Amino acid sequence: MARAILIVLDSFGIGHAPDAFGFGDEGADTLGHIAAACASGAGDREGLRQGPLRLPNLDRLGLGAAAASLSGTRPPGLDAELPIGLWGAAREVSRGKDTISGHWEIAGVPVRFAWGYFPPGPPSFPPALIEALVKEAGLPGILGDKAASGTEIIAELGEEHIRTGKPILYTSADSVMQIVAHEEHFGLELLYKVCAVARRLVDSLNIGRVIARPFVGETPETFQRTANRRDYAVPPPEPTLLDRVEAAGGRVFGIGKIGDIFAHRGVTEVLKAPGNDALVTATLEAMAAARDGDLVFTNLVDFDTSFGHRRDVPGYAEALEAFDARVPELLAALREDDLLILTADHGCDPTYRGSDHTREQVPILGYSLRLAGRAVGRRSTYADIGESVADWLGLPPGPYGRSFLEPDEAQSRVRPLAWSSAR
């Protein structure tokens, strides 16, 4: 019986979506602009990385071909002929370009309703909401109350937070309230308690997530966010791929923030880890433990939070190259009846204006020992990804997407090729 491994490279878009103009994102291209910057030398940083973008393993799976199917040209450095994976691209039909919308749609449930949002402010949050939060959580008050970069607002208000005991609240272009507090001076459990209260209070406003953002350090120079982030999300409105796997008797290994994104519905095993590299290792551990019928579902968050939002081109490029170097490990861990799919949930072009997500199409890169390489085309919804996983696992089809697997593909077999660990 089959298993599936689904890995989301958070924010790794490959070109603006047809409706990007409606989001102010026309021309955004996370992969293309990073590759162009690296080819021109703008992706260099002393002691970090140098030269053209090098992604030989992702390219052999079909990354360059997928990007070219959208723009007509390959990003610099991606020139592999005859990709050996399934390759293509998908556009989003959900009404937002946020993490929850992207992941839910990947899992077969597009977001057809409109999220609630907070204005950039200050103030961003309704006074009645803050009054209720302060009272119910027993707070001395709050700081921030505006749209901001997470790292910048900690540098700005972290010392005042430590001195006063007031948590820092901020928002962004997403449907989100983010609550920042020091792990030691404020306390991690108290931060989680405050976020749980906030989650209940924002339900009536249709806010997608409340995020706990703990940090450590004593000065702006030493402040650093930790891996103890926790997302308090609303549950999906319908059964997702994860629910369907669980209902069929399979297990779902949620790696990273997957459990939080789905409000822990359908996630039977949770593995957390700090950073992309550790999350890949956790994915390999889950693959070793997974049984027939199981789904391993991973989010690699660093691409988005550490590099996309911070508009760090060299950092994003290095993170892509570091992941590419570990692709051979993932391929080597596959069993004969496994399907691996690599994709993304939205874009976050580090060369684009502002610091928000960008409305982009995402890559579909699939591989199995039983599948010959071919194009799967430009898919009209991310839900086709989840439906292909469901098809592979033998689950009945869902209502929104369509599998890109052909009926006889599971019966074919191709010889696996050697994979490169060069960076």
Image (spheres, rainbow, N blue to C red):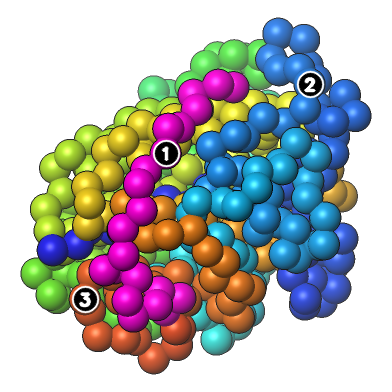
Q: Is residue 227 above or below residue 184?
A: below
Q: Kindly identify which residue carries mark 2.
A: 51
**Image-quadrant location for residue 305:** top right
How far separated are the C-alphas under marks 1 and 3?
27 Å
Tell me the amino acid under the disc marked 3: Gly
Tell me the amino acid under the disc marked 1: Leu
In the rendered structure, which disc, 1 or 3, sits on the residue that comes first in sequence? 3
- Could you say which disc has been placed on residue 394 in the image? 3
**Image-quadrant location for residue 161:** top right
- Residue occupying the point 13% across, 63% down: 1
- Residue 3: give x, y in percent of width and height: 22, 58
**SS at badge 3:** loop
**Contact? badges 3 and 2 (CB < 8 Å):** no
**Image-quadrant location for residue 287:** top left
**Contact? badges 2 and 1 (CB < 8 Å):** no
Residue 307 magenta: no
Q: Is residue 3 above or below residue 307?
A: below
Q: Is residue 7 above or below residue 154?
A: below
- Residue 342: give x, y in percent of width and height: 47, 53
- Residue occupying the point 52% across, 80% down: 111
- Residue 32: give x, y in percent of width and height: 78, 48
Tell me the amino acid under the disc marked 2: Gly
- Could you say which disc has been placed on residue 417 in the image? 1
Q: Which of the pair 91/197 is nearer the observer?
A: 91
In the rendered structure, which disc, 2 or 1, sits on the residue that comes first in sequence? 2
**SS at badge 1:** loop
Q: Is residue 221 visible?
A: yes
> Image check: 80 left or right of 285?
right
